[in-house]
Image (cartoon, rainbow, N blue to C red):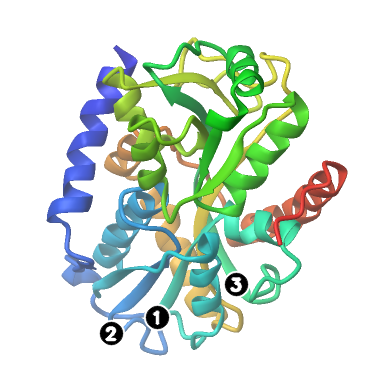
Amino acid sequence: MMFAAIRSSFCGYVQLALAGLSPLVLGAGAAWAQADAGGYPNRPSKLVVGFAPGGATDILARTIAQKLAERLGQPVVVDNRPGGGGMLSGDIVARSAPDGYTLLMGMSGPTVFAPAVYSKVPYDSIKSFAPIGIVASYPLLVVVNADMPIKSVAELVAYSKANPAKSNYASASPLFQLSTELFKTRTGAQIEHIPFKGSLEGTTAIMKGEVLTALIDPAPVVPHIAAGKLRLLAHTGPAANPEFPGTPNLKNEGVDVVVEVFGGLLAPAGTPASVIERLERELAVIRKMPDVIERLKGLGMPIRDSSAKDFAEVIAREIPMWTATAKAANIKLD
């Protein structure tokens, strides 16, 4: 029942996101056409996404871009720039003019995981950006092809040890890679990394039997779990998740790995405070919209309330936390 409802919500939106939605999302609220003091906004804005269309980040970005356009009365262009595990998009935005017209869909991977595992990141996640607010947070899902004789995390680990030449995992960013490498460290699983530009590609590879497993974002895999093509073994949240009833978290399976992914808006450092405050206010309104809440909930991405200050604190807290985790597990991805 739960997966049928998620599939219905998901499929309608993904058809819109992939087939019918132009990258130019037009503002519809004439009442919002008049800008704040200082003239912002008086032209289209760009929301840069570090991953390919179809994954959770892209869907989240298109949802927010559409609503921002309506609220601001100006078009918001979704600009997909996959590459470097999401770091390319961060580099683009960090180098952009700090005027509020170039924003970043700031995800955990390139924001707090990349600095933990790479010696050279083309931006400073704290100094290069001005946080606006988190929109949603969600756990990763541990999945395998439903045709595989694997029905639990313990069986996944055992299979990988017995079949190391056939065992690998999909990853589209440092977030997924570090999380899975930590899973390997904690379990002894023998799975090799296979990089992809987006989670949608990784999902397809698992369904084709080209990849064994993934710790992956919910959006691209939920409909295939509901359709019986993928098997959900566990999630990485800290406790039971109402979006996935009956599914254990890794802690329940005896694996000391907890990961919650955030997705929020960032602007280049130096963006005027009045612009950040305007966007923060609009984001607060968007989070409360019933259609946004239901759309993201149906993707396993529940809304998370957050101010700009809250978001800045999360980034500042999680970078050293994941850096310590990577160091303790001897994980370096250079």
Q: Are marks 1 and 2 in contact (CB under 8 Å)?
A: yes
As drawn, 96 above or below 320? below
Is 139 in front, or is 25?
Answer: 139
Mark 2 burial class by Cα count in 10 Å: few <14, some 14-19, many 20+: few
Q: Give the quadrant of residue 297.
A: top left
Horizontal arrangement in the rendering, residue 184 relative to residue 192 (left or right)? right
Please name the residue shown 55% across and 35% down the image: 168
Please name the residue shown 58% across and 19% down the image: 156
The amino acid at mark 1 is Tyr
Mark 1 burial class by Cα count in 10 Å: few <14, some 14-19, many 20+: many
As drawn, 119 above or below 246? below
Please name the residue shown 26% across and 59% down the image: 66
Name the secondary structure under disc 1: loop
Q: Which residue is mark 1?
A: 101
Image coordinates of residue 41 in percent, x first then y, are 34, 81
N-terminal label among 2 and 3: 2
As drawn, 193 above or below 234? below
Q: Give the quadrant of residue 180.
A: top right
Horizontal arrangement in the rendering, residue 283 relative to residue 115 (left or right)? left
The amino acid at mark 3 is Ala
Q: Which residue is mark 2?
A: 43
The amino acid at mark 2 is Arg
Is 169 in front, or is 293?
Answer: 169
Q: Which residue is mark 3?
A: 130
Estimate the spatial distance between the alpha carbons at disc 2 and disc 3, rounded to whole Å. Answer: 21 Å
Which quadrant of the figure contains the N terminus?
Answer: top left
Horizontal arrangement in the rendering, residue 248 relative to residue 60 (left or right)? right
Mark 3 burial class by Cα count in 10 Å: few <14, some 14-19, many 20+: many
Image coordinates of residue 329 in percent, x first then y, are 82, 41
Is 136 in front, or is 1?
Answer: 1
Name the secondary structure under disc 2: loop
N-terminal label among 1 and 2: 2
